[in-house]
Amino acid sequence: MIKCNAPDPAGYVRQILPHGFESLQPFFWQTTGGTDLTRLADGLKDAIGDRDVTIPTLGMFGNPLEDRDLDRQTLEGWKALIDNAHLFGAKTICGFTGRVRGKPIEDSLPRYREVWGDLARRAADRGLRIAFENCAMDGNWAAGDWNIAHNPDAWRLMFDSLPDDNLGLEWEPCHQLVYLIDPVPQIREWATKIFHVHGKDATVRWDVIRRHGVFGKVPFVFMRTPGFGDTNWTDVISELRLGGYRGSIDIEGWHDPVYRDALEMTGQVAALNHLKLSRGGSFVPNPA
């Protein structure tokens, strides 16, 4: 993932691509901040050069359902990314659904239908899909801020409420492990709605759960870089392929409590190599 609110996204891409990354997800946090999207797309393409690297998705992470200034900017950012996705070659726009702050998930559904019904049509007119990140952002069923798309029961409400074919999920096993949900059976059930996958994992400390529970002062789970957490990525990739998934897995870094700061890129490159091995290594064509 490439944070586009940062000063020089193209320069960052030039530094990391020699490590073997195959796809990128440029994303914005809450607002595009007036970014010239044409210039950004041109800069990223120039940084990629003739490498076989794609930009299949773009990200906008904020709360487009509420009415604060930043929330309105998030909504406008979604519209801007949908309208300009073709500049990057992206086919899917990803991010949080948003949420009516401090209310149960059901209370967000009317506003969800209003906002995302319009955005789904806008995206469909341009041949695009929308994928909702499955992170709770410290919310739960009863209350929260950023997102309602963090629980499979919420997904049922969302997709029953808006059955548009181009609305789906940006899924990762990490956020389900935080809920103590087994991610592999979930893939089997929701494969047709998984439009994009983030490469992020988690480690669950069962000894802490047995002693302190899940709501005590001792953390029972840590977000991890793939290869350092509990997920069997070979199983995840196999189930995704069996379910018809043909998209990318884009590593979401900057969360691992061990591989951080000076070890951040060490962890991300280790994750990249782990995911490549989990998919079967490099592609080998069959004999003619």
Image (cartoon, rainbow, N blue to C red):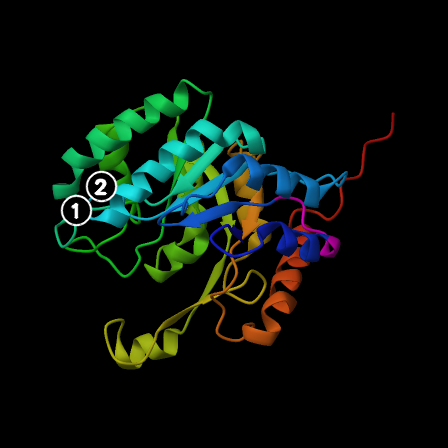
Mark 1 to mark 2: distance in Å? 6 Å
Q: Earlier in the sequence, mark 1 or mark 2?
A: 2
- Do callouts 1 and 2 mark residues in contact (Cβ within 8 Å)? yes
Specify the farthest residue to the top.
125
Q: Which mark is residue 190?
A: none
- Residue wearing tag 2: 65
Relative side of 237 to 203, left or right: right
User: Which residue is at the front of the view, 185 or 174?
Assistant: 174
Q: SS of the residue at dot 2?
A: loop
Residue 9 visible in the current orientation: yes
* Residue 219 among magenta residues: no
> What residue type is disc 2 on?
Leu
> What residue type is disc 1 on?
Val
Which residue: 35% across, 55% down? 181
Q: Compared with residue 157, is residue 209 higher up or lower down, i.e. above or below?
A: below
The quadrant in which residue 170 appears is: top left
- Residue wearing tag 1: 100
The quadrant in which residue 168 appears is: top left
